[in-house]
Amino acid sequence: GENVEQHPSTLSVQEGDSAVIKCTYSDSASNYFPWYKQELGKRPQLIIDIRSNVGEKKDQRIAVTLNKTAKHFSLHITETQPEDSAVYFCAANGGGSQGNLIFGKGTKLSVKP
Amino acid sequence: DAGITQSPRHKVTETGTPVTLRCHQTENHRYMYWYRQDPGHGLRLIHYSYGVKDTDKGEVSDGYSVSRSKTEDFLLTLESATSSQTSVYFCAISEGSAFSEAFFGQGTRLTVV
């Protein structure tokens, strides 16, 4: 089945710096890669996603890149702010099945003022 | 927020007792999921459903069963709870069209003593 590896597990940056979180997946049939943000004590919420027919997608300060050949995708946050502090999860739909949404173990991002 | 509610929100139960968690949606979404969240493990898929009476196993299905007799309700049952099932359980829903967003419930904190 699908396996999603996420690195790093923790990341600390200064406010205004950029942050990059990387994920790899194992199932070449996966074709949908969402990223979720979870603030302390709250539910995960989608922040951006990318499909396998696209190499990059941007939404204001966040962007996601996908390399299908290497089976890895990354989240980029620019001009980080304290409110970006949270746990971020990447995911992939194993086997191209919407039901089989497999998550990485998460990255705890801390943005220091 | 998507119309998705979990009940109960908190539960303490004894080892060996049966426990049922309920997920209720008002969005008429086709897919429903149960995840568990544990420190260091991220979100792990337990079971998912792609329609009434249509369910499939996820990554960590041992010790859990599910049922979906109506579109709006997805039940997760621990037949005989063990301490290793102490966790936060999240239900999620998605439309079912390709690449649609998964919306999460508020979570249920289950403690097995």
Image (cartoon, coloured by chain):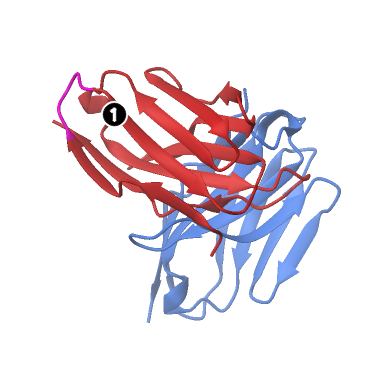
B82 lies left or right of B53: left
In the image, residue A1 sits, relative to residue A17, either above or below, namely above
The C terminus of chain A is located in which quarter?
bottom left
Image location of residue A102, percent across then percent down: 57, 36
- Magenta span main SS: loop
- For this orientation, the residue located farthest to the right is A53
The magenta stretch spans residue B98: no
Give me the residue at 74% from left, 47% from top: B99
Give SS at disc 1: strand
Residue type at mark 1? Answer: Val
Q: Which residues are magenta?
A: B13-17
Tell me the quarter of the picture where residue A30 sits: top right
The N terminus of chain A is located in which quarter?
top right
The tally of labels here is: 1
The crowd level at tag 1 (other Cα within 10 Å; few <14, some 14-19, many 20+) is: some
In red, which chain?
Answer: B
The colour one sees for chain A in the rendered image is blue
Q: Front-most of A86 and B11?
A: B11
Q: Front-most of A104 and A45?
A: A45
Note whether residue B1 is visible.
yes
**What subunit carries mark 1?**
B
Q: Front-most of A18 and A90?
A: A90
Write down the residue under mark 1.
B19
A48 lies left or right of B42: right
Tell me the quarter of the picture where residue B60 sits: top left
Give me the residue at 60% from left, 39% from top: B71
